[in-house]
Image (spheres, helix red, strand yellow):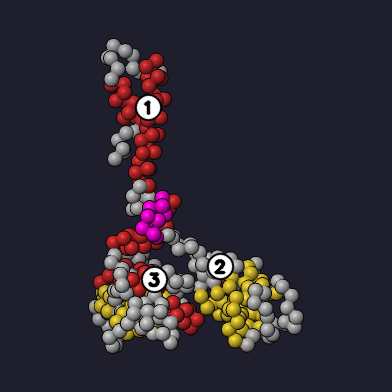
Amino acid sequence: MFENNTYENILERVLGRVKTDVDKRQGSVIYDACAPACAELAQAYIALENALDAAFADTAPREYLIRRAKEAGIAPYPATYSVCRGVFDTEIPIGTRFNIDKINFYAEEKLSDFEYRMRCETAGEEGNRHLGNLVPVDYVPGLSRASLTEVMIAGEEEEATEDFRQRYFEAVQSSAFGGNKAHYRQIVKEMEGVSMAKAERGARGGLVDVYITTPDFTPPSEELLKAVKERLDPTGQEGTGAGLAPIGHIVSVHPAKTEPINIKTEISVKQDYSKDEIAITIKEKLNEHLKIANADWERGSITIYSAQLLVEILDISGIENIASLTVNGGSYVKIPADSLVSLGNVEVV
């Protein structure tokens, strides 16, 4: 809106209002008197432009996007703490702290004999990366072996600005209400350890199948599946509305499946290039395409078209021509609604 109000344009307009018989050249009295004020006016217009951008959600920087979203009751997801399974050779008190690779975990809950739910004290993804032997921070009599064996609920970083912006627009533009698909997606994604979620109608009326993924797309642990189930529709009280699911909905929670696809492509390469080297780059390109396709899994079934994949790899340096490219032997493949897509066998001939 104010892009034309640059220092040069403002100064030109101001000097244009001065009588023609006055010296207006650079260094003259009138020029030197007007220039500083014009520079300040230009800065004021820049500030006005920034304020205008901050007022709208599509251009607002993070601080003002958060304030805008707060009006709709939406806030960025905070960083969460990873939860791991700890295995010991003796009973330990709840709250006992242990160290591994410069980060600490503490015993949060007993799972079974000598097994405990261990929560990381450092928020974010860091706690997901450390499995192995634990060193006790607090003295535990009789303890000689302690280790983290499994990530039960992955920790996540604070929601990125652009992800939060997209979620804000989805929330204000969608019709999430009363247990429809958008509503399930919204409430499940707010749960700790869940990255994406999708709800599908079950085999009979009233049955709802909810599929979830973890932030790193590894299979969700049984503990995470159970935690989501208990929040939505507690075991033993199915269909009663005791959880977040509406009355009459009997919810089952499943990990999102993964459907591998096989690619076969016939290419010719330029001189000084080898097909083996190019095949590695082709796999990298294909994996990146499937990663983007998986990001839209929540909104519907994924369809992979050979023509799109061909375009993705056509600009790889060293490829002279692509004679053909098939996906599972055909021109496209539609992935089941409950499944993500992964790269299977890639044959380059």
Stretch of the chain drawn in magenta: 64-74
The residue nearer to you, when weighing 56 against 276, is: 56
Query: Disc 3 vs disc 2: Cβ atoms closer than 8 Å?
Result: no
Q: Percent position (x, y) of residue 298?
A: 33, 72
Q: Earlier in the sequence, mark 1 or mark 3?
A: 1
Q: Closer to us: mark 3 or mark 2? A: 3
**Of helix, strand and loop, which one carries label 1?**
helix
Q: Earlier in the sequence, mark 3 or mark 2?
A: 2
Rendered view: 181 above or below 114 = above
Q: To which residue does mark 1 refer?
A: 38
Amino acid residing under circle 1: Cys
Q: To which residue does mark 2 refer?
A: 126
Q: Percent position (x, y) of residue 116?
A: 60, 81
What is the tally of numbered marks visible in this picture?
3
Q: To which residue does mark 3 refer?
A: 187
Amino acid residing under circle 2: Glu
Q: Percent position (x, y) of residue 19?
A: 28, 14
The residue nearer to you, when weighing 45 against 115, is: 115
Instruction: Determine the residue positioned at 65% across, 74% down.
Output: 95
Q: Earlier in the sequence, mark 1 or mark 2?
A: 1
Magenta-colored segment: predominant secondary structure: helix
User: Left or right: 256 with respect to 86?
Assistant: left
Amino acid residing under circle 3: Ile
